[in-house]
Amino acid sequence: MTSLGLSDLQFALAVIGLGILILVALLNLRYAHVRKKAKAQNALEKRFAPGFADISSTQNETEAEQVQAPVIMSSEKAAIDPRIDCVISLRFDEPISGQEILKEMEDWQDIPGPSGVQWMCEGLNVNVDEVETWEPIQSDAVYSELQLAIQLASRRGPLGVLELSDFCSRVQLLAETLGSQIDMPTVSAMLESAEELDRMAAESDIQLSINVAFDEPCSWKDLAIILRQRGFHLSRNGRSYEFGGPEAGLFKSAELDPNQSVKQFTLLLEFPLVPESSRAFERMLAEGVAVAQIAHGRLVDDNGMNLSEAAVTSIRQHLDVLYIKLDKSGIPAGSSTAIRLFS
């Protein structure tokens, strides 16, 4: 029998798509209303009346049950970066103490169930002479402005609607409680930025490998001696070796079984995590050649065929293009921003 309508799958996809569009539209209307309301309230009084935040607390708790709470990322490790973060600003008519801010954000840190979504908060200290000096919130400081941010994408994918909604709800509640003006992009703009960043990152998230196939199986002990002499060190898991220092290795080996002889040894390089100036691929290639010579092996590709000079040249050319692309995006390989994005 010929079907004149949509298939069940097409119909389901259409319903889901329509639902997402409606959700985004409703969120945009809600956030626009809150911004307008906050400005009107700030013109009348410096702080909202007691109990205003309590009205929204039940709704906020319900949303928190639907999505896992974001992980708080220490500002000592990274700073807010508009290249990979969605930034929401809160401005105060009168400076506010860090102690009051931290008190209102206590529940942000106490909610369990980290989902890997990272958010940060920084303040503009009014007592610091330097212009635009943002810092982690300190209880004994006074701030004229806050900026809160959530990372738009990572290797887990782009920021989702539910995660973004949860974050925006928390920021809105904070703004209402502290009586601040709020400057927030639209939900649709934030989601579009997340998708864009994810696409760019996916094109540059490359792992390179150099394989050494041994003529005869090499014992773990003999291979370990060779690698230590070459400057490698055993990783924390005890099953792989890293080159370039324990804190920021340039490349590492694939995991091996210490109880078995090694037939093939593979070196791995996470391209976006190391700077171009380190020449990590060339150094990894040189170490692969050295190990092959010492342990009687040969360089092979992933199909077990001898690695040709033409293949190496092609890899170099591809890397040059990727380095240029990341530089143009403002997220150079090996930078703190790249490390956050590709983690």
Image: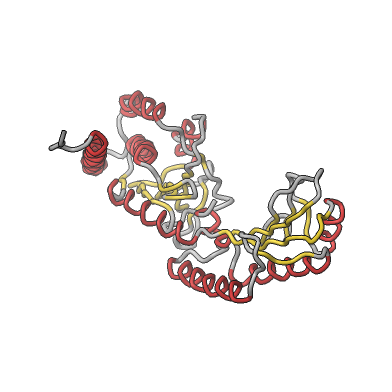
Q: Is residue 214 above or below residue 283?
A: above
User: Can residue 37 be seen by looking at this rendering?
Assistant: no
Q: Residue 324 at x, y = what percent? A: 48, 72
At 51% across and 31% down in the image, what residue appears? 113
Q: Is residue 285 left or right of residue 156?
A: right
Q: Is residue 188 left or right of residue 117?
A: left
The residue closer to the viewer here, 284 or 120, is 284
- Number of labels in the image equals 0
Quadrant of the frame with the N terminus: top left
Q: Residue 143 at x, y = what percent? A: 44, 48
Q: Is residue 29 left or right of residue 308?
A: left
The residue closer to the viewer here, 329 or 325, is 325
User: Can residue 49 be seen by looking at this rendering?
Assistant: yes
The residue closer to the viewer here, 254 or 151, is 254
Q: Is residue 77 above or below residue 9?
A: below
Q: Residue 247 at x, y = what percent? A: 70, 55
